[in-house]
Amino acid sequence: MKNWKKAIAVCASAAALVSMVACGSSNAGSKSDDGGKKTIGFVAVGPEGGFRTANENDLKKAFKDAGFNLVYSPTQNNDQQKQIQAFNKFVNDEVDAIVLSATNDSGWDDCLENAAEAEIPVFTVDRNIDIKSAEAKKAVVSHIGPSNVWAGEQAAEFVNKSFSTGANGFILEGPAGLSVVTDRGQGWKNKAADNIKVLESQSANWSTDEAKTVTAGLLDKYKSDNPQFIFAENDEMGLGAAQAVDAAGLKGKVKIITIDGTKAALQSLVDGDLSYVIEYNPIFGKETANAVKDYLGGKSVEKDIEIESKTFDAASAKEALDAGTRAY
């Protein structure tokens, strides 16, 4: 374990350290706690929408089913400092592994270096992180999640096919500084045709209400440019955009594409409020728990475990809803 406890001070301020116990779950314990079960620290995003709820519930269930003691420590409002506090507490408590669903791409090197020195393996889920330090990279065993680049590419390809002669539109983005936003945007750029013009991109912070307000402003601002599509980077923003489009009397004239695949979005697709929904599959708890179990058991684990997702039009959305098998 060397000097990793001393190194914790590098990753968080003294004030943050004082609040660590309040931030992380108070039940975190030493390795193989809770009657011999291995303890896994889950640094989570917390309440954020339908995708996040389904994802975190699935992860919690999968680790319980696999026989682990999972300690869940969510943040609020994408507060990275609270995540850093929780991460450091897990290192200090000597958990067997850490699952990290990061709110921000950067700012994790010092924490990961501490984990590496403490020989605590880290598994990143959903959002990738940008790691600079070679020592920090040693801590991360594997990343598990769907491809955000692929999701952005599907949105662009749908717009290309829908408007072969070209079209103008908008992109509603998530909060700045997230790899999910960068990757979905990059996927769009990879595939969008030259005659598909994005008049403006704005963040609506994953929020339905904010997206409604932002979209209403954009529709008014670019009325003379005849906007024909809106690519919303999550379902909640897409549903807000649909409300604004409907209020402007443009339902059926502006195609709205979203990412996640929640039941609410699929129903809106069936109802004609949305045009295309790209699933970002939140159900990968079993894959994550298996990766952790394999690694702790001495087996090799893939560096990148990509979770398969699908796309929906109105017909396939209705079929999925009628089947009653959607988890979120």
Image: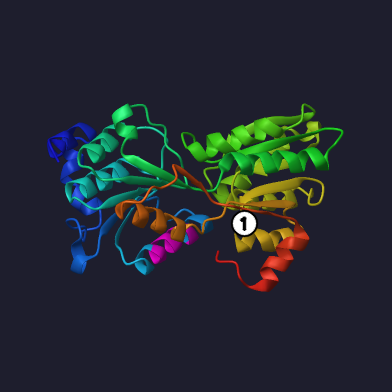
Residue 147 falls in image quadrant: top right
Q: Position of residue 266 (x, y in %)?
A: 67, 60
Residue at left offset 52%, top offset 56% = 282
Q: Which residue is mark 1?
A: 261
Say few, some or many: other residues with alpha carbon within 10 Å of mark 1 (under 14 / 14 to 19 / 20 or more).
Answer: many
In the image, what residue type sits under mark 1?
Gly
Estimate the x, y position of residue 35 in percent, counting from the top left. 19, 69
Left or right of 131 in this view: 181: right
Task: Give the farthest residue toward the right.
Answer: 165
In the image, residue 111 above or below residue 123: above
Q: Quadrant of the C terminus?
A: bottom right
- First to last magenta residue range: 54-62
Residue drawn at the location 20% of the way across and 35% of the way down: 13
Placement of 244 over or under 39, stated as above or below: above
Q: Residue at x 44, y 59 (%)?
A: 285
Which of the 4 image quarters holds residue 325? bottom right
Describe residue 272's horizontal placement relative to residue 183 as left or right: right
Work out which residue is located at the far front of the displayed protein and give it: 299
Q: Residue at x 17, y 34 (%)?
A: 7
What count of labels does the image hold? 1
Q: Nearer the viewer, residue 217 or 31?
A: 31
For the residue pair 89 and 113, the one nearer the viewer reads as: 113
Query: Residue 65 in the image: x percent, y percent?
Result: 38, 69
Magenta stretch holds residue 118: no
Q: Nearer the viewer, residue 4 or 194?
A: 4
- Main secondary-structure element of the magenta-colored stretch: helix
Is disc 1 placed on a helix, strand or loop? loop
Which residue is at the front of the view, 50 or 199?
A: 50
